[in-house]
Image (cartoon, helix red, strand yellow):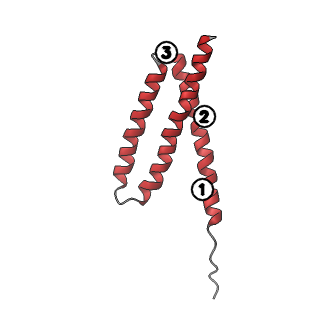
Amino acid sequence: MNELITLTLTFLAGIPLGFFFFGGLWWTVKKGVASQRPVLWFFGSLLVRIAVTMAGFYAVAGGRWERAVMCLAGFLIARYVVMRVTKVLSVNKLNLVKEVDHEN
């Protein structure tokens, strides 16, 4: 029973790691594309996101492969959620843009 609770908590710990990683990626792309120095945005973000995520996985897994797999499952669930949310946000933003009538 104790192991089930630990694996559940490990799964739940993977979710914020995934939100941080993939949400940070989405935010970086939005900021980096409009930046005068996109290399700094993309490379800096990559280093920070990987460092935080790997440290999180290392801390949560504690050397146990079962915990690492559960954390990865939560991480991938967060990826799916971020993909869906960003898609909805993009569609809503496109719907807000009005078409311009070019007839004279």
Q: How many marks?
A: 3
Residue 52's x, y, as percent? 42, 34
Residue type marked 3? Arg
| Image location of residue 71, percent across then percent down | 54, 26
Q: Where does the C terminus fall, quadrant-wise?
A: bottom right
Of labels 1 and 2, earlier in sequence is: 2
Q: Where is residue 16 drawn, in percent x and y?
A: 53, 34
Callout 1 amino acid: Ser
Q: Is residue 28 left or right of residue 85?
A: left
Q: Residues within 10 Å of mark 1 (few under 14, many from 20)?
A: few
* Residue 48, placed above or below residue 3: below
- Whether 26 is drawn above or below 37: the answer is above
Report the residue at 35% width, 60% height from top: 36
Residue appearing at x 47%, y 44% in the figure: 24
Instruction: Name the residue carrying label 1.
Output: 90
Q: Residue at x 34, y 50 (%)?
A: 40
Q: How far is the residue under mark 3 from the one under mark 2?
A: 20 Å
Could you tell me the amino acid type at mark 2? Ile
Q: Is residue 23 left or right of residue 4?
A: left
Cβ atoms under marks 3 and 2 closer than 8 Å:
no
In the rendered image, which quarter contains the N terminus? Answer: top right
Q: Which residue is mark 3?
A: 64
Residue carrying label 2: 77
What is the residue that sits farthest to the bottom in this orientation?
A: 104
- Secondary structure, mark 3, is loop
How many residues crowd around disc 2 within 10 Å: few (fewer than 14), some, or many (20 or more)? some
Mark 1 or 3, nearer chain start: 3
- Seen as rendered, the residue at the extreme top is 1
Task: Give coordinates of residue 63: x percent, y percent.
Answer: 45, 16
Q: Using the image as rendered, state which of residue 8 and residue 64 is in the foreground.
A: 8
Q: Which mark is residue 78?
A: none
